[in-house]
Image (cartoon, coloured by chain):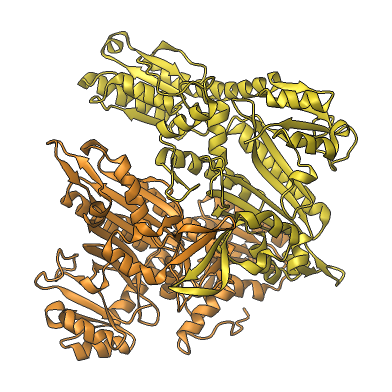
Chain colours: A yellow, B orange
Amino acid sequence: MAKAPVLTPQAEDFPRWYQDVINKAELADNGPVRGTMVIRPYGYGLWERMQADMDARIKATGTQNAYFPLFIPQSYLTREADHVEGFAPELAVVTHGGGKELEEPVVVRPTSETIVNEYFAKWVQSYRDLPLLINQWANVVRWELRPRLFLRTTEFLWQEGHTAHATYEDARDFAARIHRHVYADFMENVLAMDVVLGRKTAAERFAGALNTLTLEGMMGDGKALQLGTSHELGQNFSRAFNTSYLSRDGEQELVWQTSWGSTTRMIGALVMMHGDDQGLRIPPRLAPVQAVVMAVKGDDAVLARVREIGDRLTAAGVRVRVDDRADTPFGRRAVDWELKGVPVRVEIGPRDLESGTAMLARRIPGGKEPVPVERLAELVPGTLEEDQALLLRQARDRREARTTDAATIEEAAEAATAGGWARIRWADLGPEGEAALAAQAVSVRCLVAEDGSVPDADDAPGNVAYVARAY
Amino acid sequence: MAKAPVLTPQAEDFPRWYQDVINKAELADNGPVRGTMVIRPYGYGLWERMQADMDARIKATGTQNAYFPLFIPQSYLTREADHVEGFAPELAVVTHGGGKELEEPVVVRPTSETIVNEYFAKWVQSYRDLPLLINQWANVVRWELRPRLFLRTTEFLWQEGHTAHATYEDARDFAARIHRHVYADFMENVLAMDVVLGRKTAAERFAGALNTLTLEGMMGDGKALQLGTSHELGQNFSRAFNTSYLSRDGEQELVWQTSWGSTTRMIGALVMMHGDDQGLRIPPRLAPVQAVVMAVKGDDAVLARVREIGDRLTAAGVRVRVDDRADTPFGRRAVDWELKGVPVRVEIGPRDLESGTAMLARRIPGGKEPVPVERLAELVPGTLEEDQALLLRQARDRREARTTDAATIEEAAEAATAGGWARIRWADLGPEGEAALAAQAVSVRCLVAEDGSVPDADDAPGNVAYVARAY
């Protein structure tokens, strides 16, 4: 197989490798307005599969989908002081509509807590209406000065959940349930991503939240990427919007709330956590195409065999694509499927017909070997599951190998600036140490309890801070 | 069952009845910015089912989903003269982003032909790249001065397809295929909607199209609603954006294009075509809940039976909801399910336990009768299919009964202003007659050939114009 140097090697220039993959694997293009993106069919296909799986998990919690408007009156944002302070610098503002200047400018939603609360305040009357569990799949806009495709874009796609509960405990537990049983389970089991679950420090919290739970992943270059967040909003928004209910005891009470989001950034994470110098490696459970069956040459007998194998694998529950484009050289097609990260390639040439074999190439561990055609339908599903597990193991191994236990702030900074993560006791770091690290563009990604669980407070004894440079 | 007069009767005030249904069935609320809407979970559930079914049909044509940016540089719209003229009055314009005034204002997409062409021009190189078949599910904004929920909203949700072809014929055939085999098949077979397929006159065409194919439905008050459109764009946009390809003969040629859209307006159409004085009637094939199994009272034996029946119907492939909310009066719950248009209610009270029966209430034909419990799983699926067919027949019968064959423009205007449709030979109407009707707020909804097919030209001999007042 021809191996043209289509991508900048990771070791040479990781950001350029990333751009090359996005471009050559046809995931996305830059949009004409700075920071926007065009998600091409191959990239969007990944998003569609993420959506379908996440949507089922979200619905399994009892949450229902709805849709709130793109346009929010500017005055709504100002009602929660921290919230407006956090989002004001990133807003896109519509000043003209229908050929006229608007009386009140409207902002394009950067997130929907404010407009959701305006309606929750109408819909929630009594404790019988709680919990109210709503999610929406939507686009949001946050003006981005240093955009990077999928990672930081002015417009991105996401799901945002918004819930209202009668008690603090119920809201807290729901935020934790989304964090663990929707986000972490999905990322680990479908995306084969290694994630560290923790809580954000006060400095890194969502604007308007009491507590932000996060999932952090290590990318191929050792930097961190925040992969999803689940917030306890307390009563900050319900106070601002008077979202209250009549309790069982006949008292008017403010609701307790959560919000939580995950975005098209997950596609960028997929690229940077699993990709290598040959391109993407798509986890088999996510892959829109799990196996491509390729005709090496275009003669009729080969094409017939290729289609027959395609049918057999499809019958075995594999998502298959048949590549019978005999007018394009085999080597170019093989490089392209490799770039696109399709987990398994089954290659059939004229000589394979005589021997009754096919070449089985595995993208994730690499390598290929001849396999009897009649064993393919039995072999491929197991191979896909093995490779799914391997991807997660590789990501976990890398994170462990590149994480240093630091005793001092200096050691932590050194590890993080050298392209890895550091773990340091929060008691030894604290908000002042955090500020000192920030001067070196190093941040506390999250706090984790001594036993690896998510702590209840920043200052819980034994808390460990994960410290890194981040995208 | 209690029948409180929850809705304004249709005969008294149809627009108010519509507002009442949208509100009481919890489909949507008005948004805070004029013309925007909040789609509530029950309304959004209908949209999700529409999306899933349509998406499969769209993909079956070989079309792939992608996503283009919300923001379009204002200069793009001006490149196609008719297009900008058509959309300029409806644009929302972002003038500020990230705290600064933008150098070039950007518009919020009213539709995406222009930005799509910018990228098609990059992606299409040779005839091998054609046809290029792309769809996106997205929100769009068209500033609306007289908004009405679902029917005309400043922001709405839709799918918009955009395709590029090597020849005029291929583009024409694809636009027709979407019109007939995606839109009409979906509307008739899933939404149980009666639709007239035709072509728009020059006056009613999409801004920038050579030809617009439409589907028109008659609402409960005899007015027309445009339910979807499929456009032949010719080379208007490819000329403006230089979307060209190298042909087999080595010539650089402009592509031929189509675009086509269907929107959340279909939810409004569903309400107005099938609804009655008791509320919605949801077609069974669309209904998120096809059968609700209700406990009349909350004693344990009744609740156990209700759950058992729920399981049996689920096993029979029915989408079931169990209503065991014994703390809410039965009558109120029954009215609510009726309002929400759930096709079948199975009601179980203490006396039904002795007789081994259940009341089977059918929302679409109305009425209820006792049925042996052990026959339910066998009866309900057939009942749902019967009622699906009945809804379509009722809509078709009404349209036929309320359509007049008019010999003169005066007769056509009279029929349309009296709350019906008129059919008149296009040769007897023509653009001048069309203008005369417009003065009475009556429009030509579409042109249909003598044999009921979609004509190839406005002036094809024998063309008949369907004339009506429209939403």
> Horizontal and vertical percent for residue B244?
23, 44
Residue A282 visible in image: no
Check the picture and name the quadrant holding the N terminus of chain A.
Answer: top left
Residue A331 placement, left or right of A110:
left
Residue B251 placement, left or right of B185:
left
> Horizontal and vertical percent for residue B298?
74, 65
Check the picture and name the quadrant holding the C terminus of chain A.
Answer: top right
Where B403 falls versus A225 (above or below)?
below
Front residue of B425/B390: it is: B425
> Horizontal and vertical percent for residue A380?
46, 21
| Residue at left offset 63%, top offset 32% | A188
Question: Which corner quadrant of the image does residue A390 belong to?
Answer: top right
Front residue of A318/B249: it is: B249
Where B458 falls versus A205 (above or below)?
below
Q: How many marks?
A: 0
Where B165 falls versus B221 (above or below)?
above
Residue B214 placement, left or right of A366:
left
Front residue of B107/B29: it is: B107
Residue A343 visible in image: yes
> Residue most toward the right?
A461
> Residue most toward the left?
B461
Question: Which corner quadrant of the image does residue A397 belong to?
Answer: top right
> Horizontal and vertical percent for residue A33?
45, 51
Front residue of B179/B89: it is: B89
| Residue at left offset 27%, top offset 64% | B81
| Residue at left offset 46%, top offset 23% | A8
Residue A55 placement, left or right of A428:
left
